[in-house]
Image (cartoon, rainbow, N blue to C red):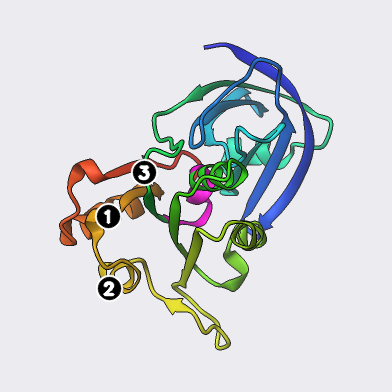
């Protein structure tokens, strides 16, 4: 796989515990919505590498990744990235992709595990695809919803996008859904699961729990795809 070098153009805090880095898209680098790259950074004891999903869309001229900050060596190196730095990566990798193959897709995700799904949503919006998208998005509290503003802007641009937020530790003013994503919540928005194709992305425990939920709802295995999101440790 070819290695690319490119320049960082922006860094941004997404939540108090997560950070995004945007960098120039190198000439000749093509990818599909939902794919990931392996980022190489200078750590305390040499190069450290981590697979990170692209939250950017192939329709955009830049690339973007987001990392939850954990205090581990790679996470600390990621936190130290500054604008105009040069970073290295290889890719693209992965088969967790979407380019309009299904008329209706339901997305199940939490936290920064949403990044490959965000890439798909951006792609559908920019390409004016008529795919109906239903995003079930679980987070801890109101201050811990990555990409909240981006999703709202996408929802305004794309009438086929519906975002269902649910919080596990909501504040007293929260009027939306509470708790984790479960069959009851999904059934409130989907009458016939056989009309939808399901994408699950997030940390391993969450994805495994979503697979159990889909099994409980009798969703056929060939009507879903999953991605164990590579950005949590």
The secondary structure type at the circle numbered 2 is helix
Q: Earlier in the sequence, mark 1 or mark 2?
A: 2
Quarter where residue 24 is shown:
top right
Q: Residue at x 58, y 87 (%)?
A: 173
Q: Residue at x 55, y 88 (%)?
A: 172
Give the left or right position of residue 84, taking residue 142 as reference.
right
In this view, the mark in front (2 or 3) = 3
User: Callout 3 environment at 10 Å: few (<14), some (14 to 19), or many (20+)?
Assistant: some
| Residue 64 pos. (x, y %) | 65, 38
Q: Earlier in the sequence, mark 2 or mark 3?
A: 3
Range of residues picked out in magenta: 109-116
Q: Is residue 101 above or below residue 149?
A: above
Q: Earlier in the sequence, mark 3 or mark 1?
A: 3
| Residue 160 pos. (x, y %) | 50, 58
The secondary structure type at the circle numbered 3 is loop
| Residue 232 pos. (x, y %) | 49, 46
- Mark 1 near mark 2, Cβ–Cβ under 8 Å? no
Please name the residue that numbered disc 1 is placed on.
195
Please name the residue that numbered disc 3 is placed on.
102
Please name the residue that numbered disc 2 is placed on.
184
Distance (Cα) linking label 1 and label 2 = 17 Å
């Amino acid at each position: 796989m070819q290695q690319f070098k490119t320049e960082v153009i922006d860094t941004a805090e997404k939540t108090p515990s997560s950070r995004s880095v945007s960098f120039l898209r190198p000439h000749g680098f093509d990818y599909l919505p939902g794919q990931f790259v392996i980022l190489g950074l200078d750590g305390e004891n040499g190069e450290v590498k981590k697979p990170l999903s692209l939250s950017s869309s192939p329709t955009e001229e830049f690339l973007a990744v987001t990392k939850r900050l954990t205090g581990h060596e790679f996470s600390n190196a990621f936190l130290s990235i500054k604008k105009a730095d040069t970073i290295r990566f290889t890719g693209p990798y992965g088969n967790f992709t979407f380019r309009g193959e299904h008329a209706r897709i339901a997305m199940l995700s939490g936290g920064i595990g949403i990044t490959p799904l965000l890439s798909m949503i951006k792609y559908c919006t920019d390409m004016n695809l008529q795919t109906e998208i239903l995003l079930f998005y679980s987070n801890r509290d109101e201050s811990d919803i990555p990409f909240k503003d981006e999703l709202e802007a996408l929802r305004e641009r794309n009438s086929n996008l519906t975002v269902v937020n649910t919080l596990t530790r909501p504040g007293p003013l929260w009027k939306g859904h509470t708790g984790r994503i479960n069959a009851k919540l999904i059934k409130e928005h989907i009458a016939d699961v056989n009309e939808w194709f399901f994408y699950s992305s997030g940390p391993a425990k969450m994805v495994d729990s979503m697979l159990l939920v889909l099994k409980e709802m009798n969703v056929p295995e060939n009507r879903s795809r999953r991605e164990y999101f590579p950005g949590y440790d």
